[in-house]
Image: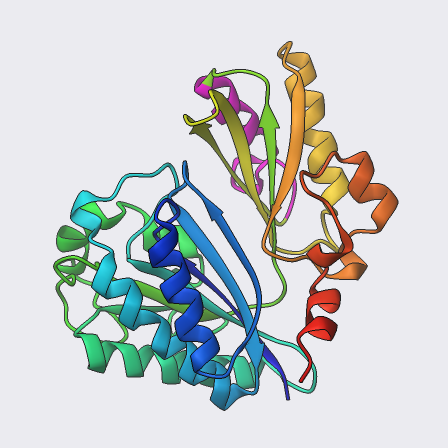
């Protein structure tokens, strides 16, 4: 039985902290598949896999170096976040079911809440109530709004105290299917236009189904980005999402520089000719989940 975890940590600028987090995962026995970091988002995504027991131990171990090094009271970045370890989703792979991933999410949520006095929200398939299925609802208000949110009736955490951890905030732990994190970079510094394109293409504003999007500024590069989560590529494929952004950018007189994947992508979601046509930055077959699983076997 194989389960993947795609943990998002609120640190993308300090290599020593990122390395410490990766080391904790490997020492716990997990197969570390990919680490994607970005300084503008100030965020790193760690993709790792193993048996449920191994992944549970690794996900729990990740909190030790992250909470020791990250203080959200002094954290800046363009990506929304509520926690030092912001979100911990579990994805069933070979021989595993969604029920296995849900059980794992709830066990890890209880573990880290008890160990670190950390509020934990369960989301997506692991959610215990319908208004917490969507991660963006949990993250609304971000770290800075957590104290007020947790004091509001109906926003008690699933595990842990009803007050944020002083420096680490809270954590969302969930179970979900495969998600593709896909961004399109634009040749402009006009954040208002990136946000306009994001509103046009995302499902919540009447755009593409199964697409979440926001416009962000990559200040280190002097450009802007339409950052997307494609939550079901059988509904909206990667190429369709790219094309929608390209059409809107062209209508606004903007050029598309490139696109990028954050983390890994299943082979079924994106063939190689399409990947190259979409101008994916640093593309290689090692961006495939299946390739990394084969490489890390044993």
Q: Residue at x 41, y 40 (%)?
A: 41
* Apparent side of residue 159 relative to residue 186 in the rendered image (left or right): left
- Would you say residue 142 is visible in this rendering? yes
Q: Residue at x 12, y 63 (%)?
A: 163
At which x and y percent is residue 167?
A: 16, 57
Magenta stretch? Answer: 191-209
Question: Please, is residue 162 above or below residue 198 in the view?
Answer: below
Nearest the eye: 9 or 117: 9
Color encoding of the figure: rainbow
Nearest the eye: 282 or 122: 282
In the displayed orientation, state which residue is furthest to the top: 253
Question: Please, is residue 155 above or below residue 44 in the view?
Answer: below
Nearest the eye: 166 or 142: 166
Queried whether the magenta region covers residue 33, the answer comes back as no
Q: Choose top left, top right, bottom left or bottom right for residue 18.
A: bottom left
Q: Choose top left, top right, bottom left or bottom right for residue 176.
A: bottom right
At which x and y percent is residue 200?
A: 58, 28
Q: How many marks?
A: 0
Q: Residue at x 46, y 20 (%)?
A: 222
At which x and y percent is residue 252?
A: 62, 12
* Apparent side of residue 131 relative to residue 223 in the rendered image (left or right): left
Question: Please, is residue 175 above or below residue 237 in the view?
Answer: below
């Amino acid at each position: 039985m194989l389960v993947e975890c795609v943990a998002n940590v609120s640190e993308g600028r300090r290599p020593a902290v990122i390395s410490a987090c990766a080391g904790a995962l490997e020492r716990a026995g997990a197969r570390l598949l990919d680490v994607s970091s970005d300084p503008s988002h100030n965020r790193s995504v760690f993709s790792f896999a193993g048996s449920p027991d191994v992944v549970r131990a690794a996900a729990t171990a990740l909190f030790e170096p992250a909470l020791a090094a990250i203080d959200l009271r002094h954290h800046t970045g363009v990506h929304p976040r509520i926690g030092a370890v912001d979100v911990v989703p579990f994805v069933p792979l070979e021989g595993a079911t969604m029920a296995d991933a849900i059980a794992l999410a709830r066990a890890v949520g209880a573990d880290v809440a008890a160990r670190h006095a950390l509020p934990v929200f369960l989301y997506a398939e692991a959610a215990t109530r319908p208004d917490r299925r969507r991660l963006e609802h949990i993250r609304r208000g971000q770290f800075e709004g957590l104290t007020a949110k947790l004091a509001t009736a109906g926003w008690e955490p699933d595990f842990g105290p009803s007050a944020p951890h002083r420096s680490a905030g809270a954590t969302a732990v969930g179970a979900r299917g495969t998600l593709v994190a896909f961004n399109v970079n634009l040749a402009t510094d006009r954040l208002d236009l990136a946000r306009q394109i994001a509103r046009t293409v995302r499902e919540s504003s009447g755009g593409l189904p199964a697409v979440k999007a926001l416009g962000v500024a990559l200040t280190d590069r002097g450009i802007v980005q339409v950052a997307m989560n494609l939550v079901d590529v059988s509904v909206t494929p990667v190429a369709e999402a790219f094309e929608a952004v390209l059409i809107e950018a062209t209508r606004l007189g903007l050029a598309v520089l490139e696109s990028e994947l954050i983390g890994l992508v299943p082979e079924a979601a994106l063939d190689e000719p399409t990947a190259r046509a979409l101008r994916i930055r640093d593309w290689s077959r090692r961006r495939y989940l299946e390739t990394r699983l084969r490489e890390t076997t044993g």
